[in-house]
Structure formats: structure tokens, C-alpha cells
Amino acid sequence: MEYAIEIEGISKRYGDVQALQQIDLRVGKGEIMGLIGPDGAGKSTLYRILTTLLLPDEGSASLNGYDIVKDYRHLRQILGYMPGRFSLYQDLTVEENLEFFATIFGTTIKENYHLIEEIYVQLEPFKDRQAGNLSGGMKQKLALCCALIHKPEILLLDEPTTGVDPVSRQEFWQMLKRLNTENITILVSTPYMDEAAMCDRVALIQSGEILTTSTPANIRTEYQGQLLSLKSQDMYHLLKTTRSLDGVMSCYSFGERLHVTIDPETSNLEMVQSALSTKGISKVEIKPIEAGVEDIFMQLLKRSDA
Amino acid sequence: MKKYFAFVKKEFRHIFRDKKTLLILFGMPVAQILIFGFALNNEVSDAGVVVYDMSGDYESEQLRTTINASNYFHEVAQVHSIQEIEASFKAGNAKLAVIIPRELGNDLRNGRKSTLKVIADASDPNEAQMLVAYMTAVTMKGTRGKVDAKMELPLVTAEPRMIFNPELKSVYMFVPGVMGFILLLVSAMMTSLTIAKEKEFGTMELLLVSPLRSTHIIFGKVTPYWILSFINAMIIIILGITVFDMPLNGSVTLLIAICLLFSLTALALGIFISSRSNSQMTAMFISMLGLLLPTILLSGFIFPIENMPIVLRGVSHIIPARWFIIIIKGIMIQGAGLSILLKPFGILGLITLFFSVAAIRGVKPRLDA
């Protein structure tokens, strides 16, 4: 497989804080790679290194074969970058922002209009409004347009959907999927687990380290133990009791239910049910479920902590 | 080139959309020059005086008429004791008191010297000295006619003659000073602020991750402010000439050249500051403390450089505004040509070159060093 992004052993330290530790990551050409991790995991630092804004302390990386240190000038022509924070000119209008970014990349809005058309039609009614007065979702759409207007080969999106309403988030992802068919490689970070399923592959990152890299489907098979979902009237009591049972590896509340992982060698669904009823909790809705990205992430975090 | 023009266009949009920036850019120079020109001048005009006339004869009456007839003083009240003088100083009615001795008429008639007592409120020492000097001049003139013939003249009299500025108009000093100050403010502070703003709002990241070179960014930032500060300089000069009767004895071309050069100095300083600050707040403080304050205090604008302690006098050599003021005064008032002003021009040029190089080198192609 040909790689668009190759990262080898990249480390970065800010004073006492080790922001990135020996990061290795490969993203195939035309792939959508999701970078999933909590706030402070080092996602934005990795983005700044890949966009040639920061130099790594150790390691190397190349994008489409161009080195991030040596060939930074060339890379700046072929990358599309959308920073985590809204970073357009608030006092320029939608159209002026777009026009400015098109011009500094030596192109025009007209030339690459087909790339942004789908989102830009939604922005068009507001094209004379100053960017600072747009809603959160509109701002992100405009930022994506500005990052796309020069037809980048690789798109680096740092938390593009943070602070965006669910409908806009969905539209945003449809847009990314369509861009993907134009053979643009996309590295997108997100703190939302549900967005992981939209990626071709995902990498889980925590405390500056990549925990695992896999496809959203395969990552489920990495889950250790059997996952059960529990629900009862008195959730607090249920949580405390379940945690004290033998054979329970972990127990978290998950929305209005509990996600309980049991060791299949020493326990099973029936054993949990009977153990709970002997402790006085009988009306429990209990069913086996398949692990989602969130469950896997929680487990990986726990393992890496241990 | 297209990229550069796109940048300049964007920069002009920022400037014209921000009412506060516009106000600082154009409201401030006009306000400053008018304030300095009208309010803060230290010439004596129509100061209030109380008179304690112990004599009350024809001569003293004449003397009082002379004092009142001058444009510098007017009598606000007659008093009859030293206590009353103090009271009127405290009340702020008068700054100066003249005590006319009982023997004034007698002495004058007999060709003797007579001494007036002049008491000044020295809570503002500069003003007090000035008032006393003016009063001395006025009363000397008033009595000279009477005594000249009989009075023995002192052996040596200094007869000062003020050239270039015979009326000692302080506006001649303020116009170049305010100009230097405004140009620094507009060019240095505003550019350092706009670059710091790009860093603060994260747009600098996007500019860096584009094919734009640092030179595009720097020249794109500088061009609009260069044009605007030049317009400002012209506004101040025109105001100085029309409203305050500043002369323009030298060459206009030279005047324009120095305004362009000094704006460039200020812009280089601004970029230099911004490359070392990451927020608008820091940029503002550095420009205030590092540029504006020394400019006001050490350029000779307000305090004469000759009166400074030797260390400060040394420091004043690296204050660009000092040389700017010398050149502007040279051109406008003395009508000096380039050959005379070569030294200050050269020094200003060197300072500009130094900071331009430092500024361009200070703008890194990445976020960290």
C-alpha cells in the first residue's frame, strides 16, 4: 500500500510536559484516518508538526513523500489545514475570507468551486456576513471551504466538528466522504467516539501515545471479556453492587445503562443475574452487547494505565 | 505580486472596518496637535496679578497702567496686606503679586533706584520663573522713560535676540514632537498590534501554512500603515502651518523624505516588537513602555536634552524621535538643507536599517524558534 502520511518515532516535549511520545502512524493514500483521543492527548501538537508549524524533538514524518522539515515549503502548497480553533478573519465576510485564502494559494474560487460547492451553497445566503457573526456550524463549514479551496492533496482537520450541532456534524462527515472520492487523503481528529465509525481506520491516542490503530470493525475484536448492558430502577445501587461481584472486570455507567465487562472464563450472564438477585436486586434488564469504540477506548486506557 | 496585493487589500479592510483603529489613526493626530498647540503652551498670556500699592501716587498709577496694558498681565485686585496676597494665591485668583513701595514716586523723581517687590506663587516653579521674568521686562519698560536720562546705566546689559523663533512660540517645538510621537504610535504600535492579533486569533498559523513567504506577510502588513502614517504626517504639517503659523523655510521634498524614512523606522520597530510578543496586550505594553514613553521623555520633545543627566543624554542618542525632531526643526524652521542635516539623517537611516534587519530575521517560518 502506498502511504500518504508516514510518521516515524515522533516525540515532542514542552518544558516538563511530554506532549508526544514515539508516535508511529501510517495513513494510506485516499484514506480517511480518524485520530481519536480526549482533550490534551497531543492531537493538536501532532497536527502542528504535520503542518510544518512545529519541529519534532525526535523522529521524522513525510507527507506524500515530502519531509516535514526539509520540504516544508512544498508541503505548504499541498496541505489543507483546519486548526482546532476557529481561525479565520472575523471582520472579513464569508466571501472575502474565501477569496483571500484562494489568492494566497495562487488560485481562484472559480477554479476549485466544484470541491466546495456542496457546503458553499449553504453559506451563500450569508456570503456578505462577517465571519465573526456566523453560527458555530457555519464557521466550521467556512473553515473547511477555506482549507479546501486550493485543492489540497492531504487534508488535516483538527477537531472540525467540536461545538457543532448533530445535524451539521452529519453533513460535515458526508462532505468528507465525498471529498474522499476525489482521492484526497484525510486525517481527522475528534473527541467524539461515534465519528470513529465513519473513518476507514482509526488511531486511538492518549497522553501522547498511540494506543492502537485499526479499522472501526476490527477494533471490536480487540475487546477483552464479554460486555453486558444492565438497567434497573435504582441505578446507583446497581452500579455499586455490580462492581463488588466476582468476575466483573469493569463497570461504567453509559447513558442510562451500565456497561459491565465480565471475564468469560469465570462468569457469565446467568451468574451475574443470580448474584444480583441474591443481593436483593431482582428487576434487572440484562443483555449481551457488542463493544463500541468507546468501550474499547476505556479498556485500552485502563490497560495502558496499569 | 498578486498575493501581496491580496494581503494589502485584506489589511486595509481590517483597518477601515474597525472604528477604534480609525479613530486612533486619524482622530488622535488632530486632537493631539490641537491640544499641544493650544492648551499646553507655556507662554505667558493675560496672567492674573494682584497689586499692593503702598504709594498710590501718580507714578504708581502709571506703572499699574503699563502692567495692565501689556498682553501678559491684568490686574485682578488691589490688596492692602501681605496676608491678602497669600490669600489670593491660595484662592487661585492670581499667580503673581506686585508690591509698589511707598517711595516709588519720590525715588524716581530724584533719579534714585527704586525696587519693586514681585512675589510669585512658585507651586509651579517653571511658570513662576516665567512670570517673574515677564514682569521684570514689563516694569523696566514702564519706568525706563522716566529714569533713563538721570539713571546710571549698568555697565553691561545683555540684550537677547531670539532668532528663528523670535516670539518663542512653543508650538515650534510641539509640532515636530507630536509628529514624531504620532508616527511612532500609528506605525509602531498599530503594526505590532495587528501582527499580535493574527497570532492571538490563530490566523497566523494559517498564514504560515500557506505558500506566503515571511516577506509577503511583512510587506503586506507594512504597506497600508506606511501610506496611512505618511498621510498623518502631512495632516500634522498642514495643521502646524495653517493653524499655528509654523514656517516652512526648507525643502518640501526633504520634508517628505524624512517623513517617509521615519515612518519606516517606526514600522520596523513595530514588526520587531510583534515578533517578540504573542498577544495584543504584550505588544501594547512593549510599545508603550519601550517606545512611546522614552519618546516623550528622552527625545527632547518635552524636556531639553541638555538638562538631562549624562546617562540619559547617552540613551537619548538611540531614540529615533530625537533625530527626527532635529531634522524637522532644521527643515521647517531653520530652512536647513541636506548637507547640514546629513548626520541626523544618517543616524536615523542606520537605526532603521538595524531594526528592519532584526525585524525580518525575527519573523520565523514556524511557530517556535
Image (spheres, coloured by chain):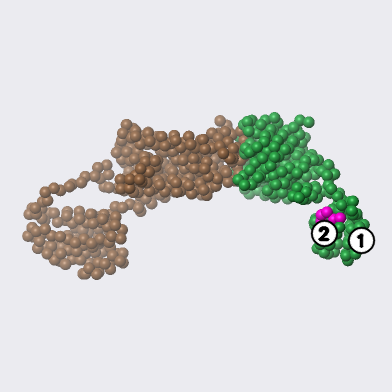
Residue at the location (7% across, 54% down)?
B150
Label 2 residue SS: helix
In the image, are marks 2 and 1 on the same chain? yes
Position of A67 with respect to A268 (left or right) is: left
Q: How many marks?
A: 2
Position of B24 with respect to B72 (left or right) is: right
Front residue (pair B342, B139): B342
Residue at the location (10% across, 51% down)?
B153
Residue A289: tell me if it is visible: no
Q: From the image, which quarter does the C terminus of chain B lie in? A: top right
The x, y position of residue B75, in whole percent, is: 24, 62
Front residue (pair B87, A92): B87
Relative height, residue B293 to residue B3 (above, below) = below
Front residue (pair B9, B197): B197
Position of B47 with respect to A171 (left or right) is: left
Residue at the location (40% across, 47% down)?
B294
Residue at the location (21% across, 64% down)?
B51
Label 1 residue SS: helix
Q: Which chain is green?
A: A
The x, y position of residue A259, in whole percent, is: 83, 55
Q: Amino acid at mark 1?
A: Ser
Disc number for residue A243: 2
Chain B's shade in the image? brown
First reached walking from the N terminus: tag 2 or tag 1 = 2
The x, y position of residue B336, in whole percent, is: 31, 35
Segment colored magenta: A247-251
Disc number for residue A274: 1
